[in-house]
Amino acid sequence: MRLASVNLNKRLGNTAARAKLTAWLHHHHVDVLVAQEPWKPVNRTAVNLADYRPVGGDLFCWSAERFTIPPVSRPESFVQRLEPGWLVVYNTYLECRSVTSRRRQLRRFQEIIAVEDGRPILACGDFNLAPRRVDGLNNGRPSNFNSSIDRRPFAELLVDNGLVDATATETPQFTIERRQSALRSRFRCDLALVPGHLLPMVDVRYNHSTRASEQAFTDHSGILMDVPVTLATVAVEDRNALFAPLPELTDRALFTSSECKPHKTAMSRVRPSPFARTVVDVLVPRLGITSVLDHGCGRGSDVDHYRAAGLDADGWDPHPGFGWNAKHDRRYDLVANIFVLNVLPDPWQRIQALQHAAQFVRPGGCLFIVTRSPADIDPKAASANWPSHQDGYWSSEAKDTFQKGICTEEIIALGLRAGLELAAEQTLLTGTSAAGQALLVRPA
């Protein structure tokens, strides 16, 4: 998905500005546009752009006609919430006249984001905030438009939610430049905040042609963001499937979606997986483990291995056909989640799976997470010409199966988003290029 964010500075009521905006959207192949200050206050009716459909007002969004319209809500007057697939996008416009109002809005924004419970978000728009002193200048000197009053809660918003100011560079790119009499103001206030664990797979860049070219249609720079979200097209039978809000955390919905069938990747094994042997031979004696749950156990061959080793072991898998979907109401010393995250088709489902797995770990107990690695998956995808989907590939379109290579660092980042902590005993895990591995802890 290519997402664009632009402050239109109330110029959308102008026919020429609309034409230039539309040309810019087509030139850059924008799928979804979020806008701040789209038109003059006298005109609040929806404005149609060629090949785009309007989605919501004041803070406004347009979606390319070939895609289904994402659900949109307005948690507060200064923020619009969109759900394009697994990602939540916050279209943001903070108060421009009062530093204390921005502080209040940022505190409230913190509360809004907390409700997402780990779901990946991207916040973009005009924050009327230069995050650093070098981002806001008057005649080359730091402006007093912003101060610690609004910068401190902004910094806390980033840290507390694992977000990164994705367009911050050592030498700032200013998104608005104005001259009034002898005063020249330059600000980087149009921002894109991206989860740190998604930053390697998200491309964010400024586009200054929106304000500094012959085809300019506003005085703000635009932001273009390429995000690994595969949007549902209008031609799909269930047109709202990918855009429906994700279900509450339930066993049945955890590893499934209307488009993907992870259970079809489960292997029929006559021997336990190598990582089940790691559990028995390494983790059990070193960590004093007596009880194990194989979370996403498939057909259960690893469960048999744990039981044969004398462990108090159970299995759980959401697919009814495997016969392991009975609910458990107990806690275990160790929960093993082996080759599960890499078959789930988006980061939010992976975080949910880890949150669900953590429910079965005793306080202070461990989760052992194993995934296929990029070194394993990417060459297979290239040689077999697997189609791209979300942040990975369709490994079989006939079976509706998905694969993504996930490295150890990404496992850890997902675990932290799920409320887990990194265990001190990582050195117990023997490295292999074909797999990512991490040992996580449920906080006591």
Image (spheres, rainbow, N blue to C red):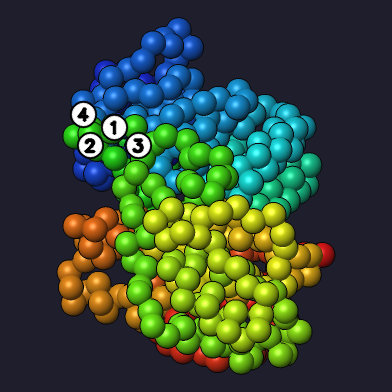
Image location (x, y in percent) of residue 115: 65, 39
Q: Marks 3 and 1, how far apart in space?
A: 6 Å
Kindly report which numbered mark, 4 or 1, lies closer to the viewer in this rendering.
Answer: 1
Outermost residue toward the top in this view: 42
Which three-letter amino acid code belongs to the residue tagged 2?
Answer: Val
Q: In the picture shown, does residue 345 fall above or below 439?
A: above
Q: From the image, tell me which residue sits under label 1.
A: 239
Q: From the image, tell me which residue sits under label 2.
A: 236
Q: In the picture shown, does residue 65 fall above or below 39?
A: below
Identify the residue shown where x is 55% and y is 45%.
250
Identify the residue shown where x is 26% and y is 65%.
395
Q: Going by the image, does 316 lie left or right of 396?
A: right
Which three-letter amino acid code belongs to the residue tagged 4?
Answer: Asp
Q: Which of marks 2 and 4 is nearer the N terminus?
A: 4
Q: Marks 2 and 4, how far apart in space?
A: 18 Å
Image location (x, y in percent) of residue 354: 58, 60
Q: From the image, tell me which residue sits under label 4.
A: 51
Identify the residue shown where x is 44% and y is 66%.
298
